[in-house]
Amino acid sequence: MRRSQIVSLLLAILIGFGSLAGVLAAGWAPVLGVQLQGGVEVLLRPTAPADDEQLDRAIEIIRSRVDALGVAEPDITRQGEQVVVQLPGVKDKQRAVDLVGQTAELRFRPVLLTFNPFDEAEFGSALDLADAYNGTITSEDAVAAEAEAVEPAAFPNFTLPEDDIADQVVVLPGRGEPVGYVLGPAELTGEAVAEAAATFNNEWVVNVDLTEDGAVGFDAIAARYFGQQVAIVLDGVVESAPVIRATEFGGTAVISGTFDEDGARDLAVALRFGALPVEFEQDDVRTVSATLGEGTLRAGVIAGIVGLILVGLYMLVYYRLLGIVAVASLAISGSVLWSLISWLGESRGLALTLAGTTGIIVSIGVQVDSNIVYYERIKEEVRRGRAVRSAADASFKGAFMTIVWADLASLIGAGVLYQLTSGTVRGFALYLGLATLIDLAVSYFFMRPLVVFIARRLVNEEPRRLGVLRAADGDVVPAPVSAGGAGPAGGTS
């Protein structure tokens, strides 16, 4: 056995079990998807017909928002006109659900009047005033309505059934305050926003950086309404209505209000990634309980363990000493794969989904196929009268080329699935592809030197220990059918 093969074998063992020991010592483990750990699933439906381009753009924005929340491996897909959002393991489910479908349409509107929304007379006067500005009632009625308005009193939060129409005077509520607003047409929209971030300076606020055109437009508003209130409206709710105290702002603005940390951060996320091009309504919100996810995970683990045991027994019974190599190869591959999945979950937020576990279980057949291809080559050479130790060395080159082409076919299939599909199917493709790449490395750096070692040190030119009889013995040993359809000539799935 060459020194290079000894070094290769030792390095493979060190990398396989060393990486596993490392992630276990660090306390890392695979991040589980929504089917395996529980979470929330939101079905969004457009309130009006939307084309494919609008829906695809909406999915991109929703994914960016969810990523900013730190949700590991969200699954965001289309089902017809519906958008399905799966959020595994979210701590504040309602916060995530609210942010997912928020259109985040930002508008700057001048304040024409504030009123007490729980005073029937004031509320009616405010609506009449808005109708007057919009041309649906006479100007005399509007003057009378404005004259009747009084300062608002302290009341709980409220909502108003008014549409936030950009070019009209509207009546809208304030967020977290008992004040109603009569607002003029929008002077500026969220397209003026380049960046937004939540900061704390005695209170939580959102700092907004404006685009070049947005800065010009905002300064024009400041000059026009200096000393007056301008409302910052998000999705039909007045977030803040500060008094303009300067005529130039240098391309930045501050949204202040009754924000807590989560509220400020969510607003910044919504503004930073822009408004959804489609207005959605929540068609359904489903919660996948942790108990249900735990049951699914348990079933998947049991299926994988049972499959491994059956495959291991088959290899040991049929290939005897070589079966030990097959089991050891699966152990090395499993250690590397577990370590890689744990690292990706910790560093990249990549989650192991139910489809991903299916891809891993399918990959067991791919890996066992590699062993069978090599073993059958050895058995053919031994049947022809070649010495076992010579057959182990000579058979690998041809067997490995077959393994490469077979694994390449699996990689192409996994790559095509990953590129052309979305959602859980991509998880299946990703983990199948990772396991196949690991199989190539383990076959070359671990399986080969270990088989050569066994052939030289443990077989002692007794082929029966490999489950094979020489042709001179007069027996015919049928070739096994591998998990992927490998035959005695080394064919693969």
Image (cartoon, grey):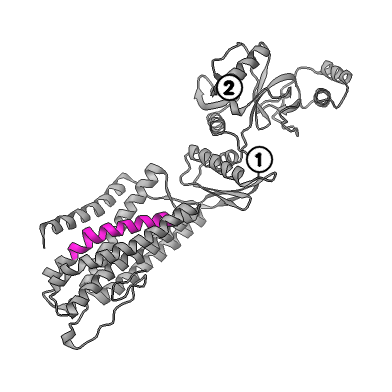
Foreground label between 2 and 1: 2
Q: Is 442 positioned to the left or the right of 102 in the image?
A: left
Q: Is 115 positioned to the left or the right of 234 in the image?
A: right
SS at mark 1? loop
Which quarter shows the C terminus? bottom left
Q: Residue at x 23, y 60 (%)?
A: 444
Three-letter code, disc 1? Glu
Q: Is residue 321 visible?
A: yes
Q: Is 226 positioned to the left or the right of 443 in the image?
A: right
Q: Is residue 254 visible?
A: no
Q: Position of residue 45 (x, y in %)?
A: 65, 47
Q: Residue at x 54, y 18 (%)?
A: 251
Marks 2/1: CA–CA distance: 26 Å
The image quarter in which residue 136 lies: top right
Which quarter shows the N terminus? bottom left
Q: Please tell me how crowded label 2 is: few (under 14), some (14-19), or many (20+) other residues with Cα within 10 Å.
A: few
Q: Position of residue 446 (x, y in %)?
A: 22, 60
Q: Is residue 215 above or below residue 21?
A: above
Task: Specify the label residue 213 is tagged with.
Answer: 2
Q: Nearer the viewer, residue 353 or 374?
A: 374
Helix, strand or loop for the magenta stretch, by majority: helix
Three-letter code, disc 2? Asp
Task: Specify the label residue 279 is tagged with.
Answer: 1
- Magenta-highlighted residues: 429-450
Q: Is residue 84 above or below residue 271?
A: below
Residue 442 in magenta? yes
Q: Residue at x 72, y 32 (%)?
A: 159
Residue 300 in magenta? no
